[in-house]
Amino acid sequence: MKVFRGLPNAASRAPCALTIGNFDGVHLGHQALLARVREAAGDLNLEAAVMTFEPHPREFFAQKSGDLSRAPARIANLRDKLQSLSDSGIDRVIVEHFSASFAALTPQQFTEQVLVDGLHVKWLMVGDDFCYGARRAGTVQMLQEAGRHHGFHVETLPTVMNGATRISSSAVRTALAAGDFARAEALLGHPYAMSGHVIHGQKLGRTLGFPTLNLRVPHRPALMGIFIVQVHGLADRPLPAVASLGVRPTVDDSGRVLLEVHIFDFAQNCYGKQVRVEFLQKIRDEEKYVDLPTLTAAIDRDAATARAYFARRGDGAKDGATSATDRI
């Protein structure tokens, strides 16, 4: 899959079947849309393409207004989004930087400069509630009229349902925030996970007896708290672990979000390695403790809860002390 940061240059442009959206989480509704794009691309001998945005448009406007609470929490980071799009059979992804100038494009400018000249769109699929251009002035009807004028076909995808629930990124965020991973999996079509490269941390976990591997979380995540997880990418099987995803209020006042994962009975230098952390069950919300001994006692209880979970499941996470390691 080819990934372009912004519109491809003239030499890299190719006629395509395109869909446009944020695709946060690439849930089952997105997957149905992507399958239709892939099918149309095959029928018309075109490349299957996706245009997505970074940052999320609502995040851009929240930053502009100074009210970050209006920005949606992220289900997936960009790496995970791109991997999901690749897994869905997409040939090329255009990651458009959402800026003030891009937001100011009129519907006509968006059609002519982006769809026609920039991407050579021949077939386009959007959701039935799709809006585009400055102040979201462009409608599906306007897009269809533009398509007739410029020579591309526009198709809409009806809402995809899961029982009585509309499958949406908002529904996935709600499930994750509640720690309902079964519900999230039903909407996503797969277990929820986050991936990233292991980075250096403060080395505090090691001194507390719970060495961790750390993953940077650049955006506000859809879930926070203490979780039972398993880690993929370090062994030939998932490794049982306990994780903290949050701002670590007891030891850090920067507000930076970090995913810290303590793998049971595991000693290996993991810096720089890419791992995938699969969330299995929420233990509790994040708390601020009065001192490090109180924090350590809470971590010990969380680890015991996670070990008991894996023991019931037969994963073999043994009771007792953890192995020393230089992971952090």
Image (cartoon, grey):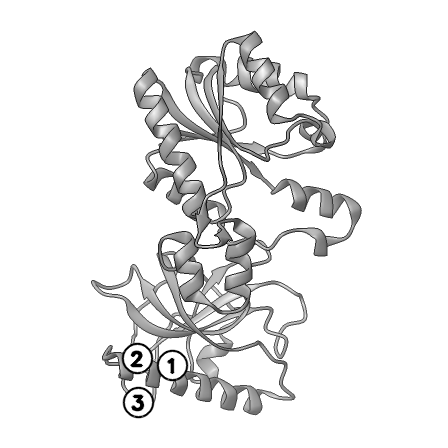
Q: Amino acid at mark 3?
A: Asp
Q: Which residue is mark 1?
A: 306
What mark, if any, has residue 232 been given in the picture? Answer: none
What quarter of the picture does the N terminus occupy? top left
Q: Can residue 46 be seen here?
A: yes
Point 43% across, 84% down: residue: 209
Query: Mark 3 falls on what kind of element?
Result: loop
How far, Cα to Cα, is label 3 from label 1?
10 Å
Determine contact: label 3, label 2, CB under 8 Å. Answer: no
Q: Amino acid at mark 1?
A: Ala
Considering only vertical position in the picture, is 5 above or below 303? above
Give the number of callouts: 3
Q: Which residue is mark 2?
A: 310
Query: Mark 2 falls on what kind of element?
Result: helix
Mark 3 or mark 1, which has the lower sequence index? 1
Left or right of 129? Residue 46 is left
Q: Which residue is mark 3?
A: 319
